[in-house]
Image (tube, rainbow, N blue to C red):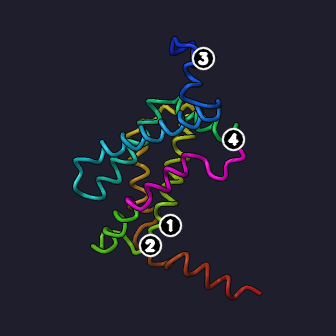
Amino acid sequence: QDVADALKIGKGTIYRYFDTKRDLFQHAVDRVMIQMGAAIDEAVLGEIDPLDQITGAIRAYLHFFNDHPQYVEILIQERAAFRDRKKPTYFKYRQANLKRWQQVYMSLIRHGRIRAIPVDRITDVLGDLIYGTMFTNYVAARTKSLVDQADDIVDIAFNGLLTERERERRGNGRVRRAAEAENEP
């Protein structure tokens, strides 16, 4: 009824388009994800350098949810109200767009611009990082500039935490951990 009142239409009109509240809600979540994708697409449209595309996508993502905090709430509500779903809508859309970004990372690897890391690892880590940032911004009502947040994510993701000297000293952390695990009793 709240939706019908907000739209100044009868509740019956809504149910001509949506069989159930669940169906209506699902379409609302789909709309959020379609709008988010469009905002990201628009932000990277003019960018030629793939690294600038990644930066633009991260900025657009954070701005989108900052400009539409009610959409974060919809994602939270979906998880709370529809626990029976195997995969929330957000992750279905993420999966559908993954190949595009994996191709960007593969190209960067081929051209020697980023390390040869499995692209699914890159997309998982960066995806989790920006998804977590989006939720933290909403829940904690952060006021830090979104450009600064995006730049911080990009800086740490692109440049890492360790100095070159420390990276050389430590070697490849994943390889070292695997070797240590093999030597455990």
- Disc number lying in front (4 or 1): 4
The reply to whether the C-beta atoms of the residues labelled 1 and 2 are less than 8 Å apart is yes
Q: Mark 1 highlights which residue?
A: 121
First reached walking from the N terminus: tag 4 or tag 2: 4
Main SS, magenta region, reads helix
Q: Mark 3 highlights which residue?
A: 11
Instruction: Give residue 1's position: percent from left, percent from top.
Output: 63, 17
Residue at the front extreme of this rendering: 16
In this view, 1 is above or below 79 = above
- Disc number lying in front (4 or 3): 3
In this view, 52 is above or below 134 = below
Q: CA distance from mark 4 to mark 1?
A: 28 Å
Kind of residue at disc 4: Phe
Q: Mark 2 highlights which residue?
A: 117
Kind of residue at disc 3: Lys
Q: Mark 4 highlights which residue?
A: 82
Residue at the location (61% across, 17% down)? 2
Q: Secondary structure at mark 3?
A: helix
